[in-house]
Image: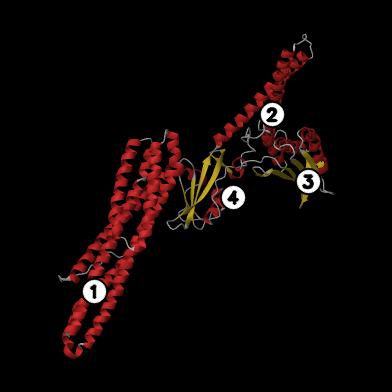
Amino acid sequence: MTIALAIVLTLFISLLRNLDRGVQKNLQATLLAQTMRTSIERQGAVLDRLLAEDLDVARTMHMDETKRFTLAAKEAEPNLDSSVSQAFNDAKEGVERFNQSILRAFRAKDREARRLIVQTDIDPAHREASKLVGVLVVRAQEAVSEANRKIVEESQSARTIAVVAVVISLIVAIVLARYYVIYALRPLKELAEQAEAIGDGNYDVKIRTRRRDEIGILAQNFSVMAKRLNEVRKKEAERLQVAEALTSAALASLYDPVIIADREGKIVKFNRAAEGLFGSSPAAPRDPVIESVGDSRIVSAILQSVRGEKTKAEDDETNLVPIGAKGAERIYRLRATPMHGELDEILGAVVVLEDITHLREVDRLKTEFIAVASHELRTPVTSLLLSSQILLEGAAGDLNPTQKQVIEAQKEDLARLERLMQELLDLSKLEAGSSPPRFARVSPQELVQGAFASVRGTAEMKSVQFSTEVEPDLPMVRADATQITRVLTNLAANAVRHTPSGGTVKIRAERESNQVRFWVEDTGQGIPADYLPKIFERFVQVPGATGGGAGLGLPISQAIVVAHGSEIKVESQVGEGSKFTFALAAD
């Protein structure tokens, strides 16, 4: 009996000491991780101060929260289980990247640079750091649960061993052994039940015992731990309520309409601006049908986002949504993005409608101004050209060589200015729709040969091999022959201009389903990848490219092709040449 008792006591004492150390260690790490998360979340106020240019307050807040985070991390590190160490290191690295971003913002020269750093660097770094610290808290809580699980397992193991020892010792003192086992194991059973309850999230359970030994101390520590965890849970719930209230207030005060959908694509909430367009927020989630938001593009953006297909934030015409509001139509730019949880799962989607009606109006006024200004300048420029020609012909008397040289240079500049004004007028008419295509049945061979004849002389002067390749028996196409010839001529002239002597330029036409596709290919210097999305914008010039225009040829060509129901596409690599292509419907 004495041996069995010694075995049981030794086992229980070892168990209690190990469990006490494990629980206290994981509890301390959990509480400190909570402090770290609170510190990094408070860093969000530093971003607000930075944007408000309150640098001294921002710097003080940043230093205080950094110090608080560092102290908590230093205290937590010795208490971490191996399963939590990686998450702890990731969190420290994420916070360090955020701190470096904050320091770059403080060193920024001006407000705009600081705002750009906040938007492109600090804000993503803050979100990432918050996410990593959140993962650390989850891992620490999992470690507490794991410790609790081990308590249950080891308690059950200890009970089994004790029962076996008592059974073996029953021959000597069955009554005494039975009493001791009951007396010794009752607190452990309660302790195991409390550990299991804590693992399930119930922190209100308590162990009532008058014992003063290790079991009594452990029971008391468990009760204290449960009380502290309950306090932490209440504080976390309060913090979440405050964060939810702040989020709702911020969402309601946004000027732009915002639509929030759940992971199934059902509409959950409108902010105040969106309610002005679509009505009140739904009492329960509803499907994003056309009747709810009024435009299929908004519905499509929501569904694409919740499926994780892509973030819809392009600036092209397909993302511009007209919506009637207060008796007038306004234009909104559609931006949709998925919402992700702490484990990167999709929680839903957010759609923001940016009101760009004023920008469209400014663009319209600018286009009208360019058109009017170009039209009004044509008469004086034409008069100056005529005057220059008259002077060169000697109508006002003979000119010496120097005078002729000056007049010829003036005539060239005026001719270039006249071409620029004509291109501006053409582009304005095309964009305004006042110069629509005059469609007719046209032969692709005729279009290609028209462009070839216009550019052949320039290619021969530059020693560029210029050729055409047209498939036989191509169908007629529905097009404005003058406008499409101009497009091919512009593309071919650009290709010759940017192709060195000895290079090749080719115009091709081939059948493609019920269309005819045209190609203009060259072996020239190519276009840098950064400029490929911009070359169809007005006045864009690729750095290092050979001069020869105002950057309006490609925008005019794209406008003409778009009016024909197609689009010019380009493929290019620096040093390997370029390929421009578009298709016209067969007639």
Q: Amino acid at mark 2?
A: Leu
Q: Residues within 10 Å of mark 1 (few under 14, many from 20)?
A: many
Q: Earlier in the sequence, mark 1 or mark 2?
A: 1
* Residue picked out by circle 1: 188
Mark 2 vs mark 3, CA separation in Å: 30 Å
Q: Amino acid at mark 3?
A: Ala
Residue sitting at x 20%, y 88%: 170
Single out the mark in the foreground, 3 or 4.
3
Relative image position of residue 437 (x, y in whole percent)? 75, 37
Residue 2: image quadrant is: bottom left
* Residue picked out by circle 4: 296
Residue 221 visible in the current orientation: yes
Residue sitting at x 49%, y 48%: 259
Mark 2 vs mark 4, CA separation in Å: 36 Å
Task: Give above or below for 212 relative to 356.
Answer: below
Relative image position of residue 377 (x, y in whole percent)? 68, 21
Q: Earlier in the sequence, mark 2 or mark 3?
A: 2
Instruction: Using the image as rendered, state which of residue 8 and residue 456 is in the foreground.
Output: 456
* Residue picked out by circle 3: 509
Which residue ends up furthest to the top in the rendered image? 397
